[in-house]
Image (spheres, rainbow, N blue to C red):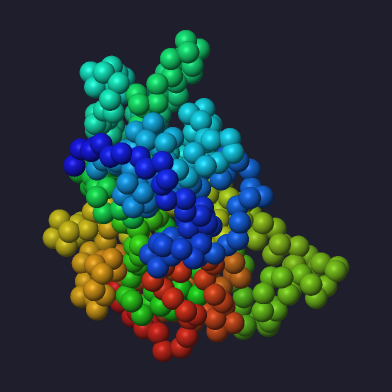
Amino acid sequence: MSLQDASINAGGHDRDLNKDRHGRGQGKGANRGHGRDRGSNRGQPRTVQISKAMSRLLRHAAIEEKIPIDQQGYVRMDHLLNWQRLRSMTPPVSFQDVVDVVQESDKKRYGLKHVGATPTDQDGSPSSSKPAATPPESESTSETEKAIAVFRSSVGMGDATPSHFFIRATQGHSMKTVEAENLLTPISLEDPSSVPETVVHGTFYGAWRPILTTGGLKSMTRNHVHFATGPTIETVMKKIRRPNPAEGDDRPQSIDQAQSQTQDKGPEQEQQQEQEQALASELDQNKVISGMRSDAQILIYIDIRKALQDGAAKGIKWWRSENGVILTDGISIDDDQSDGQLNKIVPMAYWSEVVEIKEGLGTLWRQGEGVVQELPDRLSSRAVPRGKAGGYRGRGGRGSGRGKRG
């Protein structure tokens, strides 16, 4: 599908920023997982508000907002700037504002491309030109840098033409017209250098039992399940402290409770706190370009080589995004859902180990053994953080599948 010109309605849809994945509202789109109320964004920096609006449009809402978008996920810059949501900000969002957001994104959420003038541009009418195919990750990063350099040079000459630039979100799309093959770099055993050593998915206590019941990880409203390339399981197991009841380890129910019950920390508590801080630091280092929130409570490690070996027969494909996130659409399963969104999973057959990291419980599930340790009710009953529930709704409960084998 090439870009098709569409008129930009000056009245537009002025939808609340809280509908995006960073802060959700109650309006249209909430039932698709893009809209839970977190309150107003008015107290946030301007660049954050712009980034949230751009993220919503480029990942989820371009078609809904009648903004032309191609199969690679690119939107022409002048179309973006003419979007009512950005024009309604005070002052209206400028080309420079967008470039600032692209540069300041620690997770490299956006890719920028310069395409130059076309005959239709010179005639003064909108162009339906589209950027070339996406290059590999290293080249793609320089493509954004190149576009920014061209922009700066053009500004210096007073000739920064928005219609000569395209922008896209690097991953996280829910629009089915945006095709993964056009956005991402394939991971294949035929190219060993493309295969990451670690592939891990972060989730939360309240989602764990529903995940077991489902039998795998779902992409929910997005096109893919997202994974990080760290931390390694070896690093995690070294840095968490696992309680040992046989040795009289009756540590209080949570880290916060343990810290509140004493002001004078003994050597054991100090060591525990150091380990927790070290692991938190490890997750923080991985959050910049990760595909996983730094507040994840449970880590699900994937046997990527096994998944790739089965890929040809079962149709599961893996990719790496421009910003280093590992993605897959999973394999088809029998599902009662009728909307077609929840019928693919990353099954437990491709899991290697599952580890709880916040309270030092350690391994919860291991390939070949299934559940080796139940998650306590006091943890599984906690609600999933807003924006991360997806299709795993409600709180965890007993009776969930034990996932003996994947």
Q: Is residue 173 left or right of residue 297?
A: left
> Farthest residue toward the bottom?
399
Task: State the count of labels.
Answer: 0
Where is residue 104 drawn, in percent x and y?
55, 35
In the rendered image, the quadrant that contains the C terminus is bottom left
Q: Is residue 324 visible?
A: no
> Where is 272 relative to 226, above or below?
below
Q: Is residue 330 visible?
A: yes
Report the residue at 17% width, 59% height from top. Answer: 315
> Farthest residue toward the front?
11
Q: Nearer the viewer, residue 259 or 162?
A: 162
> Farthest residue toward the top?
157
Q: Is residue 104 left or right of residue 403?
A: right
> Where is 11 relative to 145, above or below?
below
Where is residue 247 drawn, in percent x and y?
65, 81
> Where is 237 relative to 122, above or below?
below
> Farthest residue toward the left?
313
In the rendered image, the quadrant that contains the N terminus is top left
Q: Nearer the viewer, residue 217 or 118?
A: 118
Report the residue at 44% width, 76% height from top. Answer: 393
Report the residue at 49% width, 39% height from top. Answer: 87
Q: Quadrant of residue 354?
A: bottom left
Q: Nearer the viewer, residue 57 or 246?
A: 57
Q: Is residue 190 left or right of residue 363?
A: left
Where is residue 328 drawn, in percent x and y?
30, 55
Q: Quadrant of residue 268?
A: bottom right
> Where is 182 relative to 211, above or below?
above
Q: Is residue 89 left or right of residue 368?
A: right
